[in-house]
Amino acid sequence: MNNNNLTIAMPKGRIMEEAIEIWIKAGLPVPEDLDETRKLIINMKHVQTRWILAKPMDVPTYVEYGVADIGIVGKDVIMESERDVYELLDLKISPCRLSVAGIPGASSKDSVPKIASKYPKIAEKYYREQGKQVEVIQLHGSVELGPIIGLADGIVDIVSTGRTLKENGLIELETIAPITTRLIANQVSYRMKQDRIKEIIDRLSPVL
């Protein structure tokens, strides 16, 4: 890691759009033509900064292993990935919640209910802490399909407005945790590049 350069892992998609807005408000440099580029790595040599455009679930991995010094990521991804990173700042963007949902009034036919989720670790931990035994089935696509097609009794997923649940005949049953987007840092980078990282925190904090 070059001690002068700072590498930022940015998640592609909605979070990045909201993060860029507060980045600009804070007077922090943003790459030009970000909407049009197909590049996955963007170097801004004039400010000694590099952006890695990544899948959200990969951001904590890049940060933990030090290929990125800092990253922007949802609290849900931090909880699921269980990566060893510093959580520096709640950016208060992309608010939503992790919830349990299911078909109203449905009861499980099995002694061990099945729960479909993109977040198997979170789901398993939540039910274990509740003292309930469930079988967690990991899905990568629309988990709402699980109860509809009879694969699962319920789901653990991100809920924003609840519209997707409603349109698919599901209701929110329990809230596991509120979710917002966080700024995270590699532990070594936080010590070695403290001035640069602190400057970002100091600039972002007033605009949140």
Image (cartoon, grey):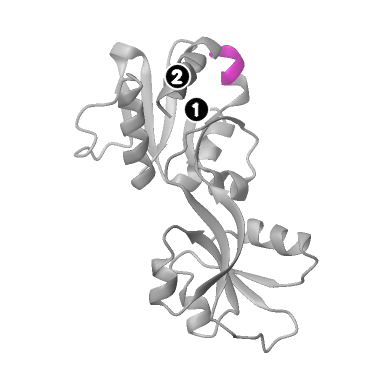
Residue at 53% across, 48% down = 179
**Front-lying residue, 4 or 163:** 163
Look at the image and tell me in which quarter the C terminus lies.
Answer: top left
Residue at 61% across, 47% down = 79
User: Which range of residues does the magenta coloring cover?
Assistant: 189-193
Using the rendered image of the protein, determine whether residue 66 is visible from the camera's viewpoint. Answer: yes
Three-letter residue code for mark 2: Ile
Using the rendered image of the protein, determine whether residue 117 is visible from the camera's viewpoint. Answer: no
Q: Which residue is mark 2?
A: 200
- Circle 1 packing at 10 Å, graded few (<14), some (14-19), many (20+), is many
- Circle 2 packing at 10 Å, graded few (<14), some (14-19), many (20+), is some
Q: Are marks 1 and 2 in contact (CB under 8 Å)?
A: yes
Q: Which mark is residue 70?
A: 1
Could you tell me residue 155's position as x and y percent?
Answer: 56, 70
Q: Is residue 120 left or right of residue 9?
A: right
Could you tell me residue 36's position as x and y percent?
Answer: 19, 39
* Cα separation between marks 1 and 2: 10 Å
**Magenta residue check for 190:** yes
Of pointers 1 and 2, the one earlier in the residue sequence: 1
Quadrant in the picture for residue 120: bottom right
Q: Main secondary structure of the magenta part?
A: helix
Residue at 35% across, 30% down = 22
